[in-house]
Image (spheres, grey):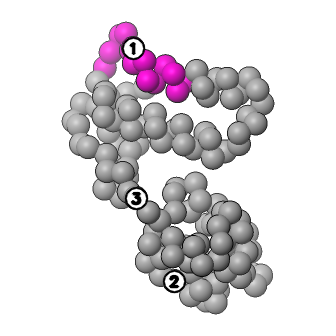
Amino acid sequence: MRRCLASSDGAYGEVELRPSRKFADPRLSAMVAAVHAEMVAGFPSGRLFLDSVEQAMAVALVNGHAVRHRPVQICRGGLGPARLRRIRELIHAKMEDELGLDELAQSVGLSTAHFARMFRKSTGPDPASICSAPKARAC
C-alpha cells in the first residue's frame, strides 16, 4: 500500500506513504489484530466499530508513515462520518417519501433536539430544511 486517502482539513487529499520493506508499527498491529478478532467473531460490534478503527488506522498511517506529514485535525462536535453517511443513505432511500426530523434522529440514535444541533454543526443547513424540501435532498 503506497497511497491512502486522509482527511486533514475537511477536504480529502491524497497522502503518499514512505516505502518500506519492513513495516512495523505496534499500534497498527494492535488495530489489525482487533479487526481480525472482530472478523473471526462474525462482526458482533457492527459497522461503527470498523469505521472507528479505520479512522484510527488512517490517522496512525498519516502521522507516522506519510512522506509529506500534514497533521490531521480532529474535529470536535457535530456528527461523525459514519452517522453522516447513514443520514445520507436514509435521505436517498426515502427521496420520494415524507421524511421527518424524528426519523433522521432515530436513525443515528440521537434525540431530535441533539440531532438538530449536531447536524447543523456538521453541515450548516438546518435539518428541517432538508426534510421539507424534496429537491434539497439530492445531497
Q: Can you identify the residue that label 2 sits on?
A: 126
- Residue 139: image location, x then y, percent: 55, 73
- Residue 104: image location, x then y, percent: 68, 73
**Relative to 114, is 64 above or below?**
above
Q: Can you identify the residue that label 1 sits on?
A: 24
SS for dot 1: loop
Whether residue 3 appears in this view of the structure is: no
Q: Earlier in the sequence, mark 2 or mark 1?
A: 1
SS for dot 3: loop
Dot 3 alpha-carbon crowd within 10 angstroms: few under 14, some 14 to 19, many 20 or more: few
Q: Give the residue at x 46% y 38%.
A: 56
Hey, which residue is sitting farthest top in the picture?
22
Q: Residue 31 colored magenta?
A: yes
Q: What residue type is labelled 1?
A: Ala
Looking at the rendering, the stretch of residues picked out in magenta corresponds to: 19-32
User: Mark 1 or mark 3: which is in front?
Assistant: 3
* Residue 42 appears left or right of 121: right
Q: Can you identify the residue that label 3 sits on?
A: 76
Q: Give the residue at x 65% y 72%.
A: 111
* Residue 3 appears left or right of 90: left
Whether residue 41 appears in this view of the structure is: yes
